[in-house]
Image: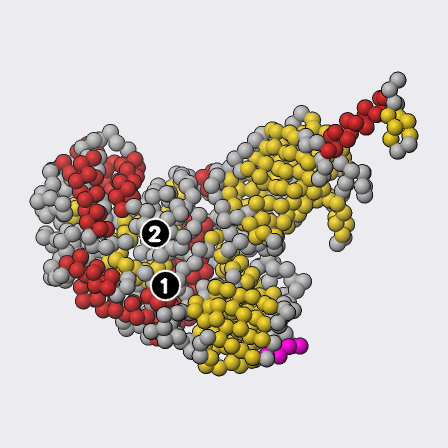
Amino acid sequence: MTRLVVSGKIISCLTAAALMMMLFVCCSSPQISHHKWKIVTDGAAETLRIEQVDLGTVLKDVKLVLRENDHIYYLSGWQIKPEDKKLIITTVNPKNTTWTFEPTATGLDASCSAENACLKAGAPADEKRIPARTENQDNGIMYTSLGLVSATNIRNLFDRATDIMIRFPEGSSLVRDPADNSNMQVTLPVIKGEEIALTNDYYIKELGLKYYKPQPERFKTAPIAWSSWYCYYMGTTEADVMQEADALSKYLMPYGLEYVQIDACYTRGEEANYLNWTKKTFPHGGKWLFQYVQDKGLKPALWVNIYGSNYAHAECADKYPENFYLRDKNGKLSGACCTADTTVVRLDYTNPEVIEKHLKPMFKILKNKWGVKYLKDAGWGTWMDYYEKNKINAFDSTRDSRDVYVEVQKALRETVGDDFYIGGCAMHEVGLCFGIFDGSRTGGDDQAVWYPEREGGMSMQVFFNSLFGANYLNNITWHCDPDAAMVRNPLTVEEGRTVVSTIALTGQLYMASDFMAKLPPKKIELYQKTMPTTPIVPIDLYPYKIKSNKRDGVVWCCPRVKEYPRAIDLKVNAVSGVYDVVAVYNWTDEDALKTISLGDDLGLDTRQAYLVFDFWNQKLKEHSKTDISTVIPPHGTSVYVVRPVLDHPHLIATSRHITCAVSIEQLEWDAAASMLKGTSRVVKGDPYSIFIHVPDAMSIANVNANAEIQYQKIEDSVLEVKFAGKPKTDTDDTIAWSVAF
């Protein structure tokens, strides 16, 4: 009989064989595959990797642990036994346990023979696989993110490319890995029947969209523009646009405003069309006016209903053939939606010649010769309705209205290229042009009044309904455009602050429409403190408290919201630090005390203290471990920067931008030198402040900068260093600063 000597003992051949099998199983990498899941083991390292066919790696470096009170015990001495459709692992140290992993059609179920069992693992979570909350986690606070963030009450990951929601069991913890922010450190409770669940086609099947496509990468942030419409409407003139361009260039372009958009107004009368403007109000024409805009450093933007053209005076020919136009059942022409008058009539895009001989040449002129960089692509989808009712007279009556609509938009995109912004205008079912539009209106027209004059009328309530109701789409499928932001009278400063704070902390398309040449400085400042837009992504991936936004089970435009959120919580992970910016609302008509819980509402770890800095009033409000309470005026908003207290001096806020992330380009605490230093990009001519928390045991030795320091003062353990505005003639718009302690 063959015998094996192990540690001085003689073992029979049978026992040796069993031992060799055990060593093989422990040190090799058995795996199982079932229901698109794959579990790969590493016996030597005693870890697992959990993969899914569509997602790739879901969890990596998975360790088996037991949790008792505040202690974590890692289990070792693995024996791995792949079974048909299951993986079973037993452990020896420090406790004998048996673990079972079983892929299912909806997820991966894990169970353990011991109580308080957990998995500790890493989870890939970069910009394409983002932290998410679903509707059952709604707590009245809307969560958004800037950078790679986490919170105690976020336990899902959404994979943007595949439209798959990864749901981890209740009680799971997902925390950013300090060494690699694109990875989450995950702790999952193991309870039989509570699996790692997948929701496939999340936006389509669970939320009811008819279409889903990830946002194109053409424009990282939503644009900031000024629109003529809600100031001048159809009465807009060349002189108006010139006056506003002058003001925009002076007051808002340095803060990030880019585009000047002229809305419907310029095609009035039989002679005018999209290339030959109404001479009475635009005597020099559109090309000349847009050159004026460009000379001011701004970019031309234009409203065009591409589904219409002037019948009597066509844009790209002396006269178009009759089969270029779509007629009703009686053979009559009809005015295209939203144009200045009935001289612009509906085109028949079932005739391919309309694309080739009208659309493409017209937009080559608008882009290449006029300098247009942005199109508000209007029409509200009404062309589809009209065609369906009158297709009997169409060039090709066999075409589907949606197919034709999308074909036109594809041709437009092909013509203008990827450096041209296309914003849609709230067509019927949401998502019809995902991937083609860079952004889209999500609701109806608003107006510079807080409440509508009549039920269902225009007001800023339309703006908020659109903004909150569609935020789950923003920077996921396209930039959401809730319509114009306005702050002028009769809106109060408090109401204006609510408008601009909300658009800034969601990162949606920022279209202002005020008389900027006449707006008082305190209201101009509201815009300046909230521009530019930043690449904010929603965490709450569901329509917020919607009354109804579906027709026949499909999501439609123009959502209405049952109640607005108590707050927006923007979670930030940027060069400026890891912190929250919280807008607390008072939607009532009277002063009201509003309280936000740091733990339950914001998902912060309340075992530590936080600094609460009032952004709009530029001062420290309080230290807190529990909540933020404040009395807010009617329709007003308080915005707080909430940062954990550290054991060394650290930046709390800046005066430049509501996110406190826009200006900071470098930031470092040098412990050896006891020095905080940074680099800030500032607006030339504009004073700039940094606010630094100074622990009680420390004092300030000196402050240095390559710019004039107006003053430095310390109050409530917060140092403010205010720099004079850098001269506008200075070629450098950065300030390098340091504070020694």
What percent of the width, then of the height, locates residue 510?
A: 36, 59
Which secondary structure lies at badge 1? loop
Q: Nearer the viewer, mark 2 or mark 1?
A: 1
Which secondary structure lies at badge 2? strand
Q: Is residue 662 magenta?
A: no
Q: In this view, does 718 lie above or below 121?
A: below
Q: For the residue marked with disc 2, what is the amino acid?
A: Arg
Residue at image mark 2: 441
Which image quadrant: the N terminus? top right
Which image quadrant: the C terminus? bottom right
Q: For the residue marked with disc 1, what is the amino acid?
A: Gly
Of the two numbered discs 2 and 1 on the same chain, state the one appearing first in sequence.
1
Q: In this view, does 246 lie above or below 330?
A: below
For disc 1, the neighbor class at 10 Å (few under 14, some 14 to 19, many from 20) is some
* Quadrant of res 30: top right
- Rendered residue at 61%/41% (across/down): 59
Between 473 and 453, the one nearer to me in the picture: 473
Residue at image mark 1: 256
Please indicate, yes or no, whether residue 546 appears anywhere in the rendered image.
Answer: no
